[in-house]
Image (cartoon, rainbow, N blue to C red):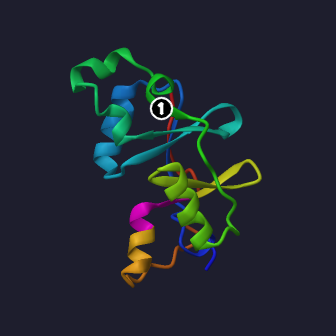
Amino acid sequence: MRIDALMVRDVHAVEADVDAEAAWHHMRRAGVRHLVVLGEEDQVVGILSQRDFALRDAGSLARFKVRELMTPRAIVAPPELELREAAKLMHDHVIGCLPIVDGARLVGIITTTDLLAVLAGEPRPEPDPDTVRPTGRVLRK
């Protein structure tokens, strides 16, 4: 199975210059554990995860920008990558998500939760290509 059959296409993303506190609140409201960080021309430049906030208290987040907390140089994968290869990539790099890019364009994301759902035999809802847009939820500065 290719990861484009499993990836979530409605990616939550954030620009690198957004205040970390705003990004944290966005993650909490959206119920997501990862935000793909976008730079110029919406290029993937990093990942902001719950772990990146772990050593900060909520009151101190106002002092930081996303770029200061994110994990830079995100590991990305093409949509045609096989699921097994994606799982190995995530395991080898000890990462919880894998942004999916077609060329330089962000088209989706796959997480460890998505992989576990497949192993558990959980059905995945089919995305509606007319209503779901990659990077449809970008938190901008």
Q: How many marks?
A: 1
Q: Identify the image quadrant of residue 27.
A: top left
At x 52% / y 73%, what residue is drawn? 127
Reply above or below: 45 against 66: below
At x 39% / y 27%, what residue is drawn? 20
Of residues 54 and 64, the one nearer the viewer is: 54
Name the residue tied to disc 1: 70
Reply above or below: 12 against 53: below
Q: Position of residue 41 (x, y in %)?
A: 71, 36
Of residues 20 and 138, the one nearer the viewer is: 20
Compared across the picture, whether 135 is left or right of 60 comes to right
Q: Identify the image quadrant of residue 132.
A: bottom right
Residue type pointed to by label 1? Met
At x 77% / y 53%, what residue is drawn? 103
Compared across the picture, whether 79 is left or right of 96 comes to right
Of residues 66 and 85, the one nearer the viewer is: 85
Reply above or below: 128 against 107: below
Q: Position of residue 24 (x, y in %)?
A: 33, 35
Residue 11 shows up from this direction: yes
Q: Secondary structure at mark 1?
A: loop
Which residues, given as a range, are shown in magenta?
A: 109-114
Residue 132 shows up from this direction: no
Q: Position of residue 79 (x, y in %)?
A: 67, 65
Disc 1 residue crowd, few under 14, some 14–19, many 20+, Cα 10 Å: many
Q: Position of residue 47 (x, y in %)?
A: 51, 40
Q: Identify the image quadrant of residue 98.
A: bottom right
Reply above or below: 81 against 61: below
Q: Residue furthest front?
A: 92
Q: Quadrant of the N terminus?
A: bottom right
